[in-house]
Each structure stands twice: as C-alpha cells, then as structure tokens.
Amino acid sequence: MVAPALLGALYGQAALYGQTPGARGKVEFEAASIRLNPPQAGFHMASDASSGGPGTSDPGMFRCSNCTLATLIVKAFELKNYQFPGRTALAGNTFDVMARVPAGTTREEFQAMLQNLLRDRFALTFHFTQKEMRGYNLVIAAKGSKLKESSDSAAPAAAGDANGHSWNGSGAPNRFGQGEAHAHSGPVSFNGNSSFRRDHQTTAELAQMLSDQISLPVEDQTGLRGKYDIALNWSGSTADSGSHTDGAFGGAGHDHGGPGAASGGDSRSADAAAPGLFDALQAQLGLKLVSSTRAAARIFVVDSVHPLPTEN
C-alpha cells in the first residue's frame, strides 16, 4: 500500500510535470516522486522489480520500490547486461519511485518519459558506442536436454522475471518480464556461489539470464519451445567469463552478478563445491554454451550522473 503522504506529494506535482505527453515539448510523466531510502544495516537486497505502466493491469501508475539508479537506466533504455558494463560503478543508493503515466501512453513513450526523468532529476548524460565482442549460442548438449517441462496446473498467477515487467501491450514476455509485481526471482549469490530457481521459463529467457551473468550476448539455439522448471547451481569464481572487465564507466570493471543477483544468505544458495556456470549448465540442464562469431555490440556509456536526484 502506498503511504498517503507519498501519494499526496506525487499527485501534487502534476502541475510541475504537465498533464499530457509533450506538454513542455517532450514526453513526460504527469507527476513523479523519487524518494531516497535510508541506509540499511546488515544484509539487504536491492530490487529490480517494478509494477505498472503500459501493458500491465495498472497502466496509469508506475512503481519501482528499493530500486537502484542502474536499474532505472537499464529499464529506461532496455539494456542487456553486456550493453551496460559500467553499471556496478554507479552509487548503490536505492529509491522508491512513483510516476503517473498519461492515459494512452505507448511503451516507447513510457521509455522516453523514464529517460527524461533521469535527465531531469539525476542530470544523466550518456552516449552509445560500438564494441566488438564474442558471444555464445545456447544449444542442447551431446547427451540431450535434462530440462523438466512445467506442469500447466502449477503455472504462477502473476509471475515476472528477474528484471521487471512486460510493457509491450501484447502479453508477450520480453526482457522486462512476464506479468505483474513479484518477489525477487533472479539468481542469488552467496560467498562466490550462485543459485537460480525459476518455473515456467522458456529457453530464450534462460539464455537472457545467462547473458546477464556473463555480460556477453547469448542466443537461444536449442530449438526447444516448451516452458520448464529450472534449477541451476554454480560457482561464480570458476565461470568461463569470470575475469572479464570492460570499464565503460570511469574505467571501472564489473562483476557478473545479473540484475537479480545479490549478496546475502539464501536457503537455495549454491553448494560450496558447485562447478562453474558453463560446466553446471551442461551437467544439470543438459545444455551447452558454444562460442559464436564476434559481432558489434551497442554499449551504453554514462558520461555524468548525480548519485542523488533533485528534490521532488
């Protein structure tokens, strides 16, 4: 439930942001509130989950709770992890974001509104650059797939993926999810080991998760068309691409925890002797990552950004 004071403050900003898209010459939210969360002692987890916006059951109100600046950038520009190697160099502050979306807003307009919000409130400046990088194809291993097909009766009522929600208006899943609000459901990392548990996943969605983990393109070439209950445990320290560093922001390197990855305890954490990601994929799921031809990738580079937003 949204706090009445916060909701009141949000609606009070309507005059500032305008009542319709393009009212000030650019598409904008009718009103937006960004609240900095206080520092949290001990273990805590940033969230990549969001709700509302075009294509959801609440198209008029977008929310992102306990959301990082990197998460907002990824969502605004629909970035894959390998396109944003500098994300871990950004400040780790978390925010509660609420924005009123004008009626009839398209998914593309929504993205433009979020991009403009980042420019206005965080003074974000950026550019894209081309970079040649290798990628991988996800294929079935020699001994065959070990994937367990999901039961239709066990389908989750309102599932999203590790990154958020679908805004394509058709119900088709994309990088930002398959449904409405959800609990943390991406990979969980603890002491160098990682665990991924997800039901009703396509191999294309699995390929996206793997791409996020290794920060390189992964193309689904399995030919499998079902939905599967996936359980995968691996050691992050022994993955094939674990030493990769790309420093697209301030020359800093990055790790390979996906957007759902977090530090902290979890009863499903990987075993201390878990294999590397590539070996685990073959042993546990009967799938394999095969190196593919180098290709030009579009990389997002932050030129400057303020760690804290301007006042609401």
Image (spheres, helix red, strand yellow):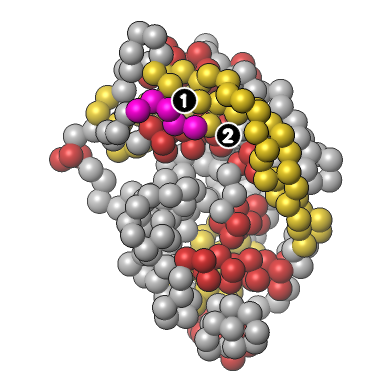
Crowding at label 2, few (<14), some or many (≥20) Cα neighbours within 10 Å? many
Residue bearing mark 1 = 138
The residue lying at 52 percent from left, 51 percent from top is: 48
Q: Earlier in the sequence, mark 2 or mark 1?
A: 1
Q: Tell me: residue 49, above or below residue 202.
A: below
Q: Is residue 90 left or right of residue 265?
A: right
The residues tagged by marks 2 and 1 sit, at their Cα atoms, a distance apart of 10 Å
The residue lying at 35 percent from left, 36 percent from top is: 202
- Asked whether residue 222 is drawn in magenta, I would say yes
The residue lying at 46 percent from left, 44 percent from top is: 162
Counting from the top left corner in percent of width and height, residue 267 is at 42, 29
Name the element at disc 2. Answer: loop
Counting from the top left corner in percent of width and height, residue 223 is at 35, 28
Query: Do we see residue 99 in this rendering?
Result: yes
Residue bearing mark 2 = 217
In this orientation, which residue lies closer to the viewer: 88 or 246?
246
In what quadrant of the picture does the N terminus appear? Answer: bottom left
In this orientation, which residue lies closer to the viewer: 133 or 80?
133
Q: Which residues are magenta?
A: 219-223
